[in-house]
Amino acid sequence: MHTLTSSSVSLLPEVARFLDAGPLGGVIDGRDEQAADGATFETLDPGTGEHLATVAAMGPADVDRAVDAARRAFARSGWATMHPNDRAIWLHRLADEVERRKAIIGQIEALDAGKIEQQAQGDVQSFVDTLRYFNELALNTERRSALPVSGYEAWTTRQPWGACGFIVPWNFPMVLIGWNISPALAAGNTVVIKPAEDTPLSAIYLARLAREIGFPDGVINVVTGLGEIAGAALSRHPGLRRMSFTGSPEVGRMVAEACGRNLVPCKLELGGKGAAVIFDDVNIEETADKLARAITFHTGQVCCDATRWLVHESIFERFVDASVAALQRTKIGYQLDPGAEMGPVVSAKQRERVLGYLERGQRDGARAVLKGGAVDVAGHDGFYVSPALLAGSLENVAAREEIFGPVAFLAPFRDEAQAVELANDTDYGLANSVWSHDPRRASRVAEAMVAGNSWINAHNLFPLGVPYAGVNRSGMGGGVNSVETLFDYWRSQSMVRPTR
Ligand code: NAD
């Protein structure tokens, strides 16, 4: 039975059984499948560095099988053609069942991603809420529109596309699977999911659950494996009708190129280097505390985080002091320990990345106002880092590139115009925030910052129904989470008949 060797916390019996039943396969056409060549890889618990599970390392032949299964299910299972009410029953059933198993899936996700367990449960709830949201939206959207044109009877219908591919990263597996597959399924498409190699477990559990409640085989398929093998094979597969990729700009470009060769529309949700613009009329302690929570949330491995804090020069030093104090209060610990507020980063490689940026940033002239760095958590030999704050020129490498850890870079600004100019001086364009008690100024700055999302007096807000997307190096293709996303998963077809 799987146990946690270095923790006092015990696993839920269902989680231990799931982890023990290895090697865990992908799910293709409703069946657990190993890689055709028998290859496997290992996923670790980032909080202990220990083995968590052995998983099938699938390759092109397995991806072929998964896409074929999704295409067959689209053509023959009745999923694409069933009445929307009937499809809605299936999707509500899946949402209910995932919600009922929130503790189990949350613990699997916490173990695999190094995520604080309560936050992991929140991610599972986000999946459930997103699925319900798109389900209701699809049910209440008219799919046939008459077009008033002279001399013709004309109308359009909205049809699902077919088999859709989804490649997701390791930081929010359940949230991002929910954001991505919910509109596709609600619109009547079938899906193939390629989870990240660091966090494949929740996707496997989800596909098994769909099978358990009787979903038609082949509607939800999961191929596990390495990005450059399984991910690359999925992104170049000509059998797909749409692709959605969430991850780094470097890989996003490769995926979009591969899709382009097959003329497959591709949605990209990529990285960020968001700014928080803090004016001199804020409550300094409260604002510093909120931003400290944002940058330590999931150990700073959040694409839309505020990683450049632009502070009015008149409060700069006081804000720095308040931020240091707030970050020093963060309780770092094993992700399943109830007192922990910030867990490890996902892997040894990710820890090296964070430490590397801290070192390069300081070599490049940044002042470490809070040193950060690797940190030990007693009894857990995992990938822990403590929060860091750098300050200095915004030309610094740590102020320009995405670090993906609990690190923020601070710089002062003189006036509103300069604040906007500095916030926009980036290749990215995912999310920024502005902090001020003056609502008119806050709205003005929010609208002037070039990105998919501007938040006011808060950071990391994702209400369903509000489009979430990146521009420039942060993404393309329409974004997620709104009515427009649902329409992305329907193609429009026009019918025309002469009337004279
Ligand atoms: P990554 O690009 O390395 O990997 C993402 C996914 O792509 C993984 O499933 C991986 O296996 C796969 N992959 C890797 N190489 C591939 C290839 N050659 N072909 C096809 N697929 C391949 O990113 P990551 O390190 O897992 O995630 C971190 C990045 O994701 C950050 O840049 C972060 O900002 C971004 N992100 C963006 C959003 C958003 O909504 N905009 C959300 C979360 C994360």
Image (spheres, grey):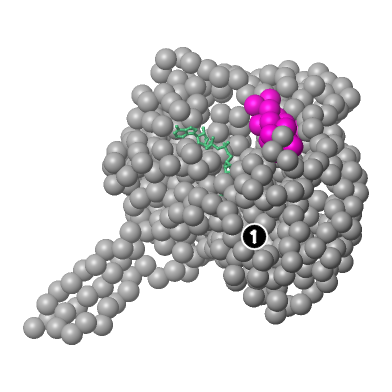
Q: Secondary structure at mark 1?
A: helix
Image coords of residue 268 (percent x, y): 47, 49
Q: Residue at x 81, y 36 (%)?
A: 372
Residue numbers of the magenta segment: 344-362
User: Within the image, what quadrant is residue 74 found in?
Assistant: top left
Image coords of residue 104 (percent x, y): 70, 37
Question: Does residue 117 show up?
Answer: no
Query: How many numbered discs?
Result: 1
Give the amino acid type for the residue marked by disc 1 in the picture. Answer: Leu
Q: Nearer the viewer, residue 145 or 79?
A: 145
Q: Residue at x 27, y 78 (%)?
A: 147
Q: Residue at x 28, y 42 (%)?
A: 262
- Residue 496 in the image: above or below residue 117: below
Query: In the rendered image, which quarter contains the N terminus?
Result: top right
Q: Answer few, some or many: residues within 10 Å of disc 1's Cα (few below 14, many 20 plus, some between 14 and 19).
A: some
Left or right: 33, with 462 as reference point: left
Query: In the rendered image, which quarter contains the C terminus?
Result: bottom left
Tell me, yes or no, whether the highlighted magenta stretch contains residue 33.
Answer: no
Question: Does residue 450 show up?
Answer: yes
Image coords of residue 418 (percent x, y): 67, 66
